[in-house]
Amino acid sequence: METATEYLDQKAQFQAWDETQALGEASMRSLILHGKICPYCGGTPVLAESYGIYHGVDHGLVWICRPCQAWVGCHRDENHAPLGRLADARLRSAKTEAVQAFAPIWGKWSGVRKNARHLAYKWLAGHMGISVSRSYIAKFDVDQCREVVDICRTRNAQFDFDQFLERNT
Ligand SMILES: [Zn+2]
């Protein structure tokens, strides 16, 4: 049996979903990308401690939708703004693969060029045909994560990025 708090939570979630639908698709996409609503059920994520989900390991606070077991980390300041969209188990593993493929591309430059990571995202955005502000792995869906892996695993991805850095000095 659900508690009164859970009932009120759910009620608030449905209200948020109705309001969001009224806002139109573009605003909804933006709310999803900013972790304001759950991409899977439309519910409102709540701020929670992370040791419950990381098996006792504390990774700071997360925004979580418990019914979907979807969550995202947050900025470590007083606003606790979500780092991106909420991710379920499938998306979390796709993101891990994307990060593992992408990090080595710019990683070797991280000690050499202080904005290497930013430039790497710019390079990635160019290959994906999206704006750099939308090109962060934290904002990607499963298909986009797969695209990152494909791009980074092509034979000359490293060479291509090295050239890109030279052009962007
Ligand atoms: Zn949800």
Image: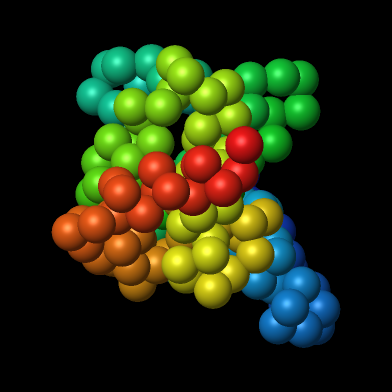
Colour logic: rainbow
Q: Nearer the viewer, residue 125 or 95?
A: 125
Q: Position of residue 90 (x, y in %)?
A: 26, 59
For this rendering, which residue is in front, 45 or 79? 79
Task: Tell me the residue at 41%/53% (across/down).
Answer: 87
Total numbered badges shown on the rendered structure: 0
* Residue 96 seen in render: no
Instruction: Identify the residue at image location x=29%, y=47%.
Output: 158
Q: Within the image, what quadrant is residue 132 found in?
A: bottom right
Q: Is residue 95 placed above or below 134 in the rendered structure?
A: above
Q: Position of residue 63 (x, y in %)?
A: 55, 40
Q: Nearer the viewer, residue 3 or 113?
A: 113
Q: Between residues 141 and 115, which one lies in front from this camera angle?
A: 115
Residue under the point 76% across and 20% down: 78
Tell me if 17 is positioned left or right of 59 in this view: right
Displayed quadrant of residue 51:
top left
Q: Is residue 109 above or below residue 118?
A: above
- 152 with respect to 13 (left or right): left
Q: Position of residue 147 (x, y in %)?
A: 33, 68
Residue 74 at x, y percent in the picture: 59, 32
